[in-house]
Image: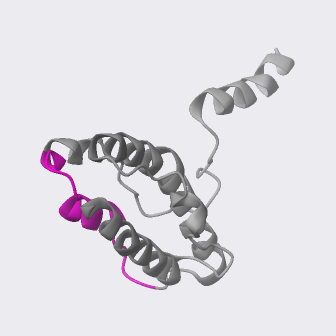
Amino acid sequence: LRVLDWVPKLWYHLHTFLEKHSTSDFLIGPCFFLSCPIGIEDFRTWFIDLWNNSIIPYLQEGAKDGIKVHGQKAAWEDPVEWVRDTLPWPSAQQDQSKLYHLPPPSVGPHSIVSPPEERSGKDSTPNSLES
């Protein structure tokens, strides 16, 4: 049940992060956590996947939006550091490296969000038309 005590703390930490680095359009709601399993092993697998594939991309978009609208509002803190320090399962130390970092956002012409395979297809289209 330690994991169930930890989830509200995680939510609060992520909410605080978004308050500092995003706009009011980006909120972490309970929908991220509705499928939370109760068993430790199931939770471990579920959370690593949730963090890397849902939470990190959402925080990236929120931080990028915040930079565009407000500029740098606060000193950057990668939220994964708190998460790694507080993971609530016994084998947490070996799983820390599986959690993705959140780099500070860059806003500009070279900060494309699309995955590399989509981007390369889009980039090659104009070149192939010219030749």
Q: In this image, 2 relative to 37: left or right?
A: left
Task: Tell me which residue sits at (79%, 17%) in the image.
Answer: 128
Colour scheme employed for the rendering of this structure: one colour
Task: Tell me which residue sits at (62%, 48%) in the image.
Answer: 113
Q: In this image, 129 relative to 23: left or right?
A: right
Which quadrant would residue 86 be assigned to in this image? bottom left
In the rendered image, residue 79 lying in the magenta stretch gets the answer yes
Taking 67 as reference, is 32 above or below it?
above
Which quadrant would residue 62 be assigned to in this image? bottom right
**Depth check: 121 or 80 in front?**
80
Is there any visible trace of residue 106 in the rendered image?
no
Q: Which residues are magenta?
A: 74-93
Is there any visible trace of residue 97 in the rendered image?
yes
Residue 52: where, in percent of width, then height?
44, 46
Figure quadrant of the N terminus: bottom left
**Depth check: 39 or 18 in front?**
39
Residue 55: where, in percent of width, then height?
50, 56
Residue 34: where, in percent of width, then height?
55, 58
Q: In this image, 112 relative to 127: left or right?
A: left
Figure quadrant of the C terminus: top right
Which quadrant would residue 61 be assigned to in this image? bottom right
Taking 40 as reference, is 7 above or below it?
below
Residue 119: where, in percent of width, then height?
66, 33
Q: In this image, 77 relative to 71: left or right?
A: left
**Depth check: 83 or 103 in front?**
83
Residue at the right extreme? 129
